[in-house]
Image: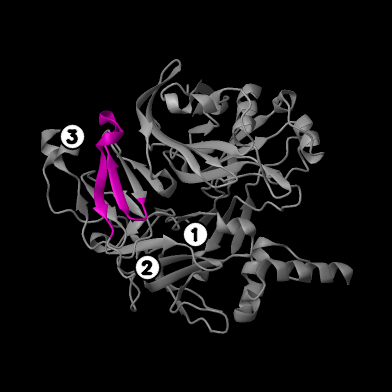
Amino acid sequence: MTSFAQEIQQLEADWGSKLLVAPEILWDEASVFRRTSFLAGSQRTQVTSMVPKSLEENGSSSFEDLPCISKSGSIQHIGIATAVLNIWPSSSFKKAWQAKQPICYQDCSGWVAQYEVWRHRGQSNRIIDIRIPLDPKEVWIQFKQSLRRRGKSLRTSFPLTIGDSLFCFMVLRTFFSVQPGDRGSDPVIKSALVEMDFLEEINRFWSLADRENSWFYTYSFRISLDGCRIFFSDFASNTTHGEIYSSNIAVLEIEIGERIHIESQAAGPVDDLHLLQNVLFHPSLSFVLLTYPMGVKIWNYKQGTSAMKFLWKREPSTWWNGDMGFSECGKFVLIAGQQDSIPLPREYLSGLPPKARRFSKEEAPHVRSEAVINAGNGHPFAFGSGQIMGSQLISGEKGTHSLSIGGTGSIELNLINTSGKKISGLHLLSTPYWNQNQEATQTIMVPEKDSTAFTIIMERGLERAYTFNSKQEENLPLVIKRDISDVYYEAETWTSGTKRRRESIMYEQNGTEKRGRIE
């Protein structure tokens, strides 16, 4: 009875009031995320954890709140895959941190970065597992820059990023390129350090000299889709007064040959960096889009920071969730909630061949492959076989609608109109009350022709600070295979005390139209 009571308490902690509103969760989704002795696991939904296992030689098995991020995408000849980057501190750091002793240089030796790539075609399995010793000097600099106290606990930033190709990543300011080995051989790894000499304003933060404890410095990198460009941003802040002392941006270009060469293209201070939401490199031209709450800026970085200007400004009454993307031809920007795509200024397209610079009527991207989920019965969704969707996605005619992933306690594909109102929702899966869900993003793949399951990947994002807490349970990243027949339309948004109205979907399987089940 004791174990039964403990399992009930855990279910209550995981799901809370959701079970009162939708008790059917108990017989389906609840058993997906946590096995119990009295609930039979769902046979139509499978979960594979991608949480990195501890490196026993590091003695880090009791550390839970560790720097870890993941990203998913499509890789040629492999299909949908997920990269997981995890940092394992040294045993001496663990002892000093838990004893609340000052961190010294010796504690920064023995740190390891673990980089994994998981393939999800069929059953999920790991195809790359790399262990890379970190330079103790780089770890030491990071603690000197960003270690700060909040209340009774210490915390630190630890910048990490993964490129969209999944074969390049960064740990602190070191860029890594991974080339998969041929016929089962080990991957080829190349690396290069980003030298912080492109701005005089940041030199003081990259020395090993002691600094005042009331200030901390942190930074981030974003890698372009082609893996050949990096966007750098940083800021220094006063932890006592919240004052932002310095914020800078830069674009660096990468050449990967026998060795990796990294060169700065532009750098300079900016005033509104703390409002920056997202960065998007053009696929082939030398400019970048930056999204802010008030609109989208375009920056031709070859001309310096003074060349940055607004491409589109949001009207105060206009709904916008920050999503945007380039059209397939690369000459238009699609912005969520906007009825028309925005043509890029001609002066930014000079790098294209003359014929490619001509403007024609541009339609938003659409599903070209055979539809697996059919539109109809008042529901506008239609998805193609193997279509992959991420947290930022533009859909609908001329960008009129934004297809977003998320929802209150669930993973949904929601169609939003220009006023920000939910028109319809495709419910994929309810999720438990995990702390990490607030920072988590999702990547979803529609079933391929030879499959009957949605692939739902719950990612783990970079946190602003890490406390190296040993009490927090880590659940992400993970991949879920959800049978297409268990997916349904949610006709109305539900709140506590309101019954959800479900409607079954119509989908194609082996050339036959079928209807999803609703239990």
Q: Is residue 51 above or below residue 96?
A: below
Which residue is label 2 attached to?
415
Mark 2: amino acid:
Leu
**Is 296 within the magenta?**
yes
* Whether residue 466 can be seen here: yes
Considering the image in quadrants, where does the N terminus appear? bottom right
Which residue is label 1 attached to?
454
Which residue is label 3 attached to?
352
Q: Which of 159 and 130 is in front in this view?
A: 159
Q: Which of marks 2 and 3 is nearer the N terminus?
A: 3
Mark 1: amino acid:
Phe
* Whether residue 132 can be seen here: no
Q: Residue furthest front?
A: 241
Q: In this view, does 260 lie above or below 433?
A: above
Q: Residue furthest top?
A: 258
Q: Which of marks 3 and 1 is nearer the N terminus?
A: 3
Q: Residue at x 57, y 43 (%)?
A: 69
Q: Circle 1 — which element?
A: strand
Q: What stretch is highlighted in magenta?
A: 292-314
Is 99 situated left or right of 431 in this image? right
* Numbered badge on residue 13: none
Q: Evaluate if marks 2 and 3 touch, with contact meaning CB atoms under 8 Å apart.
A: no
**Is 484 within the magenta?**
no
Q: Nearer the viewer, residue 315 or 476?
A: 315
Is 192 situated left or right of 382 in this image? right
Q: Which residue is drawn at 40% across and 35% down?
A: 249
Spatial distance from mark 2 to mark 1, Cα to Cα?
Answer: 18 Å
Q: Residue at x 45, y 58 (%)?
A: 447
